[in-house]
Structures are given as structure tokens and as C-alpha cells.
Image (cartoon, helix red, strand yellow):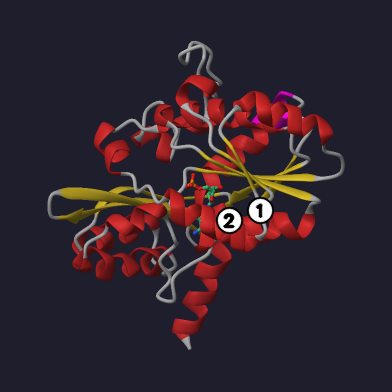
């Protein structure tokens, strides 16, 4: 496995590659959700490239960025075991030589759901993803459905800008109690972790959105939003964990909500 923190070295290597190149961009602190994306890429491509870059431009809250877990040595071990070929570790100056003068901005969907609560978040995401896709030049790039709004915006961006890459959406990987895996879960304290399982359970319930929000509030979450659109129910909550709040997001297919309703009706 090659570990590359020099973009010129990467460009030279890329020129020598032929065949399919799968790409999994991450912010590190790898878990089984990331591993699922990497496994798919390794299975479906000649070469798999993983990037680990904690992108500051997508954080609207400096505390969230400062607290974000970093487990680089462990991540490299996971990547090695999964058969990743190249790990890219770019720095801010490599990716933002323009100091974020140029940005990719979307003016509708990126302002809704998470975007309504995290100003500038999706501009940071789309900008860094476009930079990484232009640099890596993958044939296939893998993103998780856990961040469904992000996946949709990236698909739309690639189509809009005629970017020659196939965006592959991957199912959400969950803990046995249903909590979607996330790097931020490591920041939950024991009480917050225990409470978190109720988040997706309520999203999947047959209650309407307003009632789900009320129940989440009653269960002690601070609710950012619960909203059903185009066959999916989306939600974001904050979990109080003593000195900090941990933000969780998730989404479920409405079909699953209906199935749960039918099952509970007997
Ligand atoms: P992140 O490191 O949080 O930026 O995530 C990198 C990629 O992993 C994104 O495409 C995420 O959607 C995806 N991802 C994160 N958590 C999960 C999960 N629980 N299941 C599937 N994919 C995930």
C-alpha cells in the first residue's frame, strides 16, 4: 500500500495507471461504514484509492472540527487489511492553494435539511469533493447513503459539470441496535450512546414527522429537523453529552416506515 502526501507524486503515479480506479474520500476515524465502501471499491476496481482529509471548510462549528476524532495509524492498518492500494493524505495548502477563493455553490437543495442548520457546509463538501475527483480522476467514486443529501448533491454536481466519474451510493452500515455508524459516535458518552438507538427507531416509526420530532424531544434530543421527502424520512439531532453536543444524522426509506407500521398493526 502506497501512502502519498505529495500531490505531484500522486499525479505521476496516476499517469501510469490504467483500468478502473475506485475512490473513497473520507475524513478518517475509519469505521465499518467506511470499510463497506472500501470493500466495494476493492471488489469492483483494479485500483482503490482512499483519501483521508479532515476538510475544515465544511465545518461551520469550530468546536466540532477541534473535537473530530483522528486515528491515523489505526486507519492505515484498516486500509492495509482491506487491500487499499493508495492512501492519499493531502494537506490544506495542497488542496486550498487558492485559500478557498474558488467554491462550488449549489443554491437550492444544499440550503435545505442539514444545509439549513449548517450554513456553508455543503459548499465546503462540494468544493473539496470536486478538487479530489479532479485530482484522483477515478472511474468510480463511493459515497454512503447515511449522508444521503450529500450523495445527491455530489451526483448532481458531477452531472452538471460533465464530470466523467460514476458515483456509487452504498447502503448505511448500522450498529446492532440500529444506530448508523459515524466517526462522531466515538464522542458519545455512555448515556448519550444508550439514548442514540432511539433516533433511528423513531425515524422508522409510523408517526408523522411532527410527532417523531416531539418524541425525540421528549427522549432528550435537541431536534434540528425531521422531514420526509421523495420517499425518505431525514432527521438530524443533537445529543447532550456533558460538556459537548454530538450531532447525529440519519435517513430511512418510507417503505421501511410503512413496513414497521404494518408489522405493529399485526
Ligand atoms: P466521512 O469520513 O464521515 O466524510 O465519510 C466518508 C464516507 O463514508 C461518506 O461517503 C459517508 O457517507 C460514508 N459513511 C459514513 N458513515 C457511513 C455508514 N454508517 N454507512 C455507510 N457509509 C458511511
- Give how far across and how far down residue 77 sits, in percent: 52, 58
Is 5 or 189 nearer to us in this picture? 5
Res 113 quadrant in image: top left
- Whole-percent x, y for residue 158 in the image: 70, 31
At a point 19% along the width and 54% down the height, the residue shown is: 240
Q: Which residue in the protein does label 2 denote?
A: 79
Q: Farthest residue in the bottom direction? A: 266
Q: Helix or strand or loop: what does disc 1 sit on?
A: loop
Q: Is 141 on the left or on the right of 119, as rendered?
A: right
Residues in magenta, as a range: 157-161
Decide: is 18 above or below 85. Answer: above
Q: Which residue is mark 1?
A: 84
Q: Residue at left 69%, top 33%?
A: 136
First along the sequence among labels 2 and 1: 2
Q: Are marks 2 and 1 in contact (CB under 8 Å)?
A: yes
Which SS type dominates the magenta stretch? Answer: helix
Is residue 22 rendered to the left or right of residue 255? Answer: right
Q: Horizontal placement of 104 versus 218: left or right?
A: right
CA–CA distance between discs 2 and 1?
5 Å
- Is residue 60 inside the magenta stretch? no
Amino acid at each position: 500500500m502506497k501512502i502519498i502526501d505529495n500531490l505531484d507524486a500522486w499525479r505521476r503515479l496516476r499517469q501510469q495507471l490504467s483500468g478502473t480506479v475506485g475512490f473513497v474520500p473520507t475524513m478518517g476515524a475509519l469505521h465499518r461504514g467506511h470499510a463497506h465502501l472500501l470493500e466495494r471499491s476493492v471488489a469492483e476496481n483494479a485500483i482503490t484509492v482512499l483519501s483521508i482529509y479532515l476538510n475544515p471548510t465544511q465545518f461551520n462549528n469550530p468546536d466540532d472540527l477541534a473535537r473530530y476524532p483522528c486515528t491515523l495509524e489505526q486507519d492505515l492498518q484498516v486500509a492495509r487489511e482491506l487491500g487499499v492500494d493508495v492512501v492519499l493524505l493531502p494537506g490544506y495548502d495542497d488542496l486550498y492553494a487558492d485559500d478557498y477563493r474558488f467554491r462550488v455553490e449549489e443554491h437550492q437543495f444544499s440550503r435545505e435539511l442539514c444545509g439549513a442548520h449548517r450554513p456553508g457546509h455543503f459548499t465546503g463538501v462540494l468544493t473539496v469533493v470536486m478538487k479530489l475527483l479532479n485530482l484522483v480522476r477515478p472511474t468510480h467514486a463511493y459515497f454512503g447513503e447515511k449522508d444521503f443529501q450529500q450523495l445527491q448533491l455530489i451526483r448532481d454536481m458531477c452531472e452538471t459539470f460533465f464530470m466523467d466519474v460514476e458515483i456509487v451510493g452504498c447502503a448505511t452500515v448500522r450498529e446492532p441496535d440500529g444506530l448508523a455508524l459515524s466517526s462522531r459516535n466515538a464522542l458519545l458518552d455512555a448515556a448519550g450512546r444508550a439514548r442514540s438507538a432511539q433516533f433511528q427507531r423513531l425515524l422508522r416509526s409510523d408517526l408523522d414527522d411532527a410527532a417523531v420530532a416531539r418524541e425525540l424531544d421528549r427522549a432528550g434530543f435537541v431536534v434540528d429537523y425531521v422531514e420526509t421527502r421523495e420517499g425518505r424520512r431525514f432527521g438530524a439531532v443533537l445529543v447532550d453529552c456533558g460538556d459537548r453536543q454530538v450531532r447525529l444524522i440519519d435517513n430511512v426509506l418510507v417503505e421501511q416506515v410503512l413496513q414497521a407500521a404494518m408489522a405493529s398493526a399485526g
